[in-house]
Image: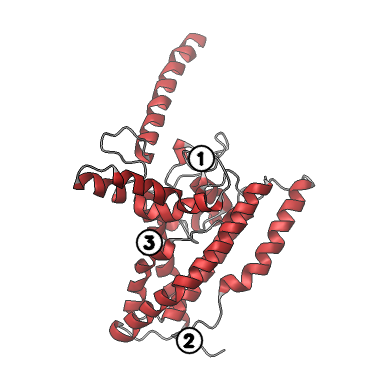
Amino acid sequence: MILDPLKPAFDPVDLAVPVFVVTIVLEIILARLGKAKAVYEAKDTATSLGMGLGSSVAGAITGAAIFGVSIWVYQTYHLFEIPMTAWWAWVAVFFLEDLTYYWFHRLSHERRFWWASHVNHHTSQHYNLATALRQTWTGGIAGTWLLWLPLVFLGFPPAMVVIQKGISLVYQYWIHTEAIRRFPAWFEAVFNTPSHHRVHHARNPRYLDANYAGILIIWDRMFGTFIPERDDEPCRYGVVHNLGDFNIFRVAFHEWMAIGKDLAGSRSLREVVGYVLGPPGWSPDGSRDTSATLKAKWRAREEVNSKAVEPEQIAAE
């Protein structure tokens, strides 16, 4: 296979589509037979599939322009000559692209502007393989792809970066399942797994804004965003305020419309910046909940409950 630095030799996602279809059908069948834990709801699954199709169309519209920018940066500014045929180059791009994905994913949860393009992925109240296909329609417009340009600037060929991004996306497909509980400890310590990613999709206050990993969970462990799944607190899926319908256009654009409504009512530059770049849920008077305030309220309740239990334990003794 001849590797062209300016043209991907293959698209991992396109190659994996038949696997996506077969495994979703298989998970549904196994669930119906009682052989695997998986909950599917017809309208919810249709929404996920529709979002996946729409994401492919949106990607085709913006992808060429984004890849063109990457080529321009590579041809004009790249610092080092990194050959696509070198094994060490693939090892390096694997780790660097995965680290980039971690920060992209974290930014997409912590800042509202980028959350608006990512939130649709979290809108399903079920967690199954079809949920993985509930992808963004507006990611290209939101500009998060800019985070990968430093890799091209260093000298990684654009085609190499695109292929590695595709590999990461395919890897993340299979971890959207409840059918697999946990892997051996060494695997759970290094790689992103269904257990870790269930936490990421959970709306329980304990689990909010955690486990941003793509392939390697080591980044969350390094940067303090790792939270393990607990058997005594099952994950509840969806967003803090779940949508009341399955309209794919509302799923795709509801947070953008909410931002527009907030901006229309803004009374100062501070409010404009807060509504756009603050954390999701930010409000000038603090009347809305953010992940931080929800977690703070949860911790306060936990502390009160633990103090209430102590006298009972003493009395029992």
Look at the picture and state if 293 lies above or below 271.
above
Q: CA distance from mark 1 to mark 3?
A: 23 Å
Q: Quadrant of the N terminus?
A: bottom right
* Residue 73 vs residue 62, the one in the foreground: 62
Vertical placement of 1 versus 52: above or below?
below
According to the picture, the residue beneath numbered tag 2 turns out to be 85
Where is residue 38? Give x, y as percent: 68, 47
Along the viewing direction, whichever of 196 and 273 lies nearer the viewer: 273
Q: Which residue is mark 1?
A: 242
Indicate the amino acid at tag 2.
Thr
Q: Nearer the viewer, residue 251 or 300?
A: 251
Residue lying at 30% horizontally and 39% vertically, measured from the top left = 283
Q: Secondary structure at mark 3?
A: helix
Horizontal and vertical percent position of residue 265: 28, 42
**Spatial CA span between label 3 and label 2:** 33 Å
Would residue 38 appear left or right of 3 to someone viewing this image?
Answer: right
Examine the rendered structure and indicate whether residue 150 appears above or below residue 248: below
Using the rendered image of the protein, determine whether residue 176 is visible from the camera's viewpoint: no
Q: Nearer the viewer, mark 1 or mark 2?
A: 1
Q: Between marks 1 and 2, how big is the CA–CA gap?
A: 47 Å
Q: Amino acid at mark 1?
A: Asn
Closer to the chain start, of discs 3 and 2, is 2
Residue, far bottom: 2
Image location of residue 83, percent across then percent down: 42, 86
Identify the disc placed on residue 142: 3
**Amino acid found under the numbered disc labelled 3:** Ala
Q: Which secondary structure lies at badge 2?
A: loop
